[in-house]
Amino acid sequence: MPYPERKPIYDTYKVIIDKIIAEKKYKSYADAEIDDLDRSLLAAFREIRLAHSLQKEWLPEE
């Protein structure tokens, strides 16, 4: 794995989607819930990225 620091995130994601898959009777219901999860995680990660990025004093790009 090229980014071992991401492993805990991937492992947690797998646990969450395994639970969703196990609880749903139809694949389309599981897919819809996982799609919603993906969208909410992406939005959350973007907010975190922006907040942390704004805290740093960046060098000007040439």
Image (spheres, helix red, strand yellow):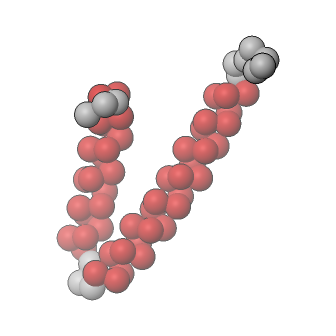
Q: Residue at x 57, y 48 (%)?
A: 44
Q: Residue at x 41, y 72 (%)?
A: 33
Number of labelled discs? 0
Q: Is residue 62 left or right of residue 18?
A: right
- The spot of residue 49 in percent (x, y) is 61, 36
Asked if residue 50 can be seen in this view, the reply is: yes
For the C terminus, the quadrant is top right
**Residue 29 percent coordinates (x, y):** 36, 81
Left or right: 22 as drawn, with respect to 43: left
In the displayed structure, 27 sits above or below 41; it is below
In the picture as drawn, the residue positioned furthest to the left comes out as 22
Residue positioned most to the front: 62
Q: Quadrant of residue 54?
A: top right
Q: Is residue 21 above or below residue 26?
A: above
The percent position of residue 36, horizontal first and vertical second, equals 48, 67
Which residue occupies 26% across, 34% down? 1
Considering depth in this image, is 2 or 34 the residue closer to the camera?
A: 2
Residue 57 visible within the image: no
On screen, residue 25 above or below 17: below
